[in-house]
Amino acid sequence: MGLLKEFLSDTTRAKHRFVDALGDYSLSVETKGRIEPFELDLPEHSLASSRAYQAAPYLILRSIFVALKKIKAPQETFLDIGCGKGRALLMAHRWGYKNLLGLDLSGRMISNASQNLAKKGIFHARLKVADAVNFQYPSGDSVFFLNNPFDGNILRPVVTALKEQSSPESVFVYLNPLREHLFQQLGFKKVYEIDSFNHNYKSSFFRL
Ligand SMILES: C[S@@+](CC[C@H](N)C(=O)[O-])C[C@H]1O[C@@H](n2cnc3c(N)ncnc32)[C@H](O)[C@@H]1O
């Protein structure tokens, strides 16, 4: 990596760390930090395919919700696949989404998400300890959010299930889209993207 790119990358990471700490503090929630899969209460067989817990930066989520408005994505139902401590759900609530769904394979993450949402008076969100592979996804118009939660062995069956179960109006946001070719292979069309020199902050938006 060139020196300038390294400098920009470090500066951007520091900016996100600062804004994320500030965001949690001002909302009185606790969503920051990183937790490795082996530190979570995940089933043994999923440790290799699961990514560490790390919430999407608040500033990145903001640009995602701006983009969702711009492309006229559904504005009622927001589902976070691998919701962790619920930061994206908190922001979806702030951006006016009324039906909030979060699923995570870790019971500990779901319990943290529930506490964080309760602190903001959000008691109507549906939070489930579930494997994304077996989940019955909502069939109505929805926004589905994936912050690179797992590897291709899990992503492929999940994207296949989403294709079979969701509506043509639904939008699928893939942050840190390491395996976006899977969406394209399965017939999804990329309708928008947010680019960044740091792959962690890129997002791709798909429709069927
Ligand atoms: C990178 S974190 C994303 C957190 C959250 N979406 C956010 O942006 O704030 C990935 C989450 O996916 C969860 N996860 C991993 N494998 C999963 C699976 N098969 N089904 C459901 N959740 C899974 C992990 O427990 C972890 O909390």
Image (spheres, rainbow, N blue to C red):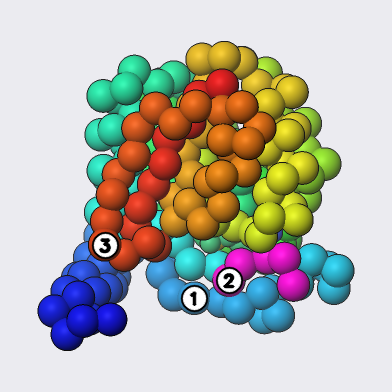
Measured along the vertical axis of the image, is residue 203 above or below residue 15? above
Q: CA distance from mark 1 to mark 2?
A: 7 Å
Quadrant of res 134: top right
Which residue is pictured at 48% across the width and 67% down the height? 54
The majority secondary structure of the magenta stretch comes to loop
Q: Amino acid at mark 3?
A: Phe
Which residue in the structure is indicated by mark 1? 34
Measured along the vertical axis of the image, is residue 76 above or below residue 133? above
Task: Report whether 71 appears left or right of 167.
Answer: left
Which residue is pictured at 42% across the width and 41% down the height? 204
Where is residue 101? Give x, y as percent: 59, 36
Look at the numbered disc 2 and give the secondary structure of its residue: loop
Assign the N terminus to one quadrant of the image: bottom left
* Image depth: mark 2 or mark 3 in front: 3
Look at the numbered disc 3 and give the secondary structure of its residue: loop
Q: CA distance from mark 2 to mark 3?
A: 21 Å
Residue situated in front as seen by the camera: 85 or 179:
179
Label 1 or label 2, whichever comes before in sequence order? 1
Where is residue 87? Give x, y as percent: 44, 53
* Image depth: mark 3 or mark 1 in front: 3
Which residue in the structure is indicated by mark 3? 197
Label 2 or label 3, whichever comes before in sequence order? 2
In the image, ligand 1 is in what quadrant? bottom right
Assign the C terminus to one quadrant of the image: top right
- Magenta residues span 48-52
Task: Report whether 19 appears left or right of 105.
Answer: left
Task: Report whether 129 appears left or right of 197.
Answer: right
Label disc, if present, on residue 52 of the rendered structure: 2
Where is residue 185? Give x, y as percent: 63, 36
Q: CA distance from mark 3 to mark 1?
A: 22 Å
Which residue is pictured at 75% across the width and 32% down the height? 161
Q: Residue furthest bottom?
A: 3
